[in-house]
Image: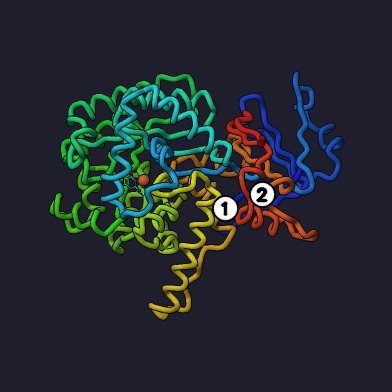
Amino acid sequence: YGTLIHSISIEQLDIVSNGVLVVNGKGVIVHVEKDVENLQEFLDTQSFKDAETFKIHKIGAEQFLVPGFVDTHAHAPQYMFAGSGMDLQLLEWLDTHVFPCESAFESVDHAAEAYQKVITRFLSNGTTTCSWFATIHLGACQKLVDIIQQLGQRAYVGKVNMDQNAPDYYIESTETSLADTRTFIEYVQGKKTNLITPVVTPRFAITCSTPLMQGLSQLAKEYNVPIQTHLCENHDEIDFTCSLFKSKDYTSVYDNHQLLNEKSYMAHCVHMTDDEIDLLAVRKTGIAHCANSNFSLHSGVCDVRRFLTKGVKVGLGTDVAGGFAPSMLDAVRSTFFASKTQKIMHRDILKDKNYVPLNPNELIFLATLGGAQVLGLQDQIGNFEKGKAFDALWVDLEGGSIDLMGGETMHQKLEKFLFNGSDQNLKHVYVQGKNVSSRK
Ligand code: GUN
Ligand code: FE
């Protein structure tokens, strides 16, 4: 009972004061009521007050509920070196930092230790849903799923595939890659949880042969699972891809291997032609915008407004460890800076005065409902509609890194949380009604 803030659409943010959210034992929102001045009177009119156990949580005056954050792109093993090794650009960075780090996940014990840390950190930062890249190793991927299940995050998890253009200490044969992916999908689908979904994860075209990509497309179809990969992140990557596959552009490579559909989502998409964006729109494929990573690996400044104008679904990704921060609050801020940089470039270089940067309502949408749409979870999460799961952050503006001067509107308080807040402003984090993290 208190203030609820959530996106209805990218245009509409709803700020509900004196709201009541009723959550049942399965963690599903069964009732939403606005403007309830007298809670007792409201309860007296409802049948659920006769439920066997019934608990009331009051959200305080300097507190509110927002939907949990949806991170549409992160690399779980790379959390090991997040915040270091940021001197290189993509392809050199992969060779120097990423592949050596990921190859160590051949050890399931090593994976268990690392994955416990990263999932705990993401949950305490309010990421209730995350789409993960793991490594090529089946055992470590299964361990990641076990740990996610135990800690209670909602997740999409991918066993990474790479059978070419990779170091000999970190590569798999086409046959092993496909067989292990099948085993992994069956392992996840066999679990008694609706929170974890397997996702087919070719690393990117450079490290995947045509037979591998074709086989992965077949597996995605056979098991009805989504597909995630990287697209148009870096100029050298794009040039190498087009020459490897003798293609006019990068997006066509995935399309020619039947990897683009309404369940697919592509990370980055920094350097796209209009034709490539149009193709994503036609295929109903989504985009994971990873602004911190695009700056940190100096890949480029992605124009999110261009995707939105063309009707392509967009969510935000931390892309740990290309992005150094394991936090969606940082993803919001990096997205804000990328959008302002686009505004500056349009105004000063392209002499276009009409470019509209992203506003705070659009930023919170992208971090929640937008991400849910990219993952195809818009009927389950992303806002506080009746029938959806209660994935939520209980935000407390006091006791953290925010100073209120008094007299701020609720909208200003939300902005303060987005720009000045931290994990210390998250009193509790819930996934499907279950408290999965609380402020220390
Ligand atoms: N492209 C292929 N692999 C990776 C990766 O691990 N991180 C990023 N940012 N881009 C990639
Ligand atoms: Fe990535």
From the viewer's perspective, tell me whether residue 207 is left or right of residue 26. Answer: left
From the viewer's perspective, tell me whether residue 28 is left or right of residue 301. Answer: right
Which quadrant of the figure contains the C terminus?
Answer: top right
From the viewer's perspective, tell me whether residue 142 is left or right of residue 92. Answer: right
**Residue 433 has which mark?**
none
Residue that lies at the very extreme toward the bottom in this rendered image: 351
**Residue 5 has which mark?**
2
Q: Residue at x 62, y 34 (%)?
A: 430
Q: Report, in whole angstroms, how far the alpha carbon at label 2 lies from the one at label 1.
A: 10 Å
Q: Position of residue 290 (x, y in %)?
A: 42, 52
Image quarter of residue 411? bottom right
Q: Position of residue 273 (x, y in %)?
A: 29, 63
Is label 1 in a helix, a strand or a loop?
Answer: helix
Q: Residue at x 47, y 25 (%)?
A: 147
| Callout 1 amino acid | Ile
Q: Position of residue 9 (x, y in %)?
A: 56, 53
Image quarter of residue 396? top right
First in sequence: mark 2 vs mark 1: 2
State the residue position of label 1: 364
Q: Residue at x 58, y 41 (%)?
A: 126
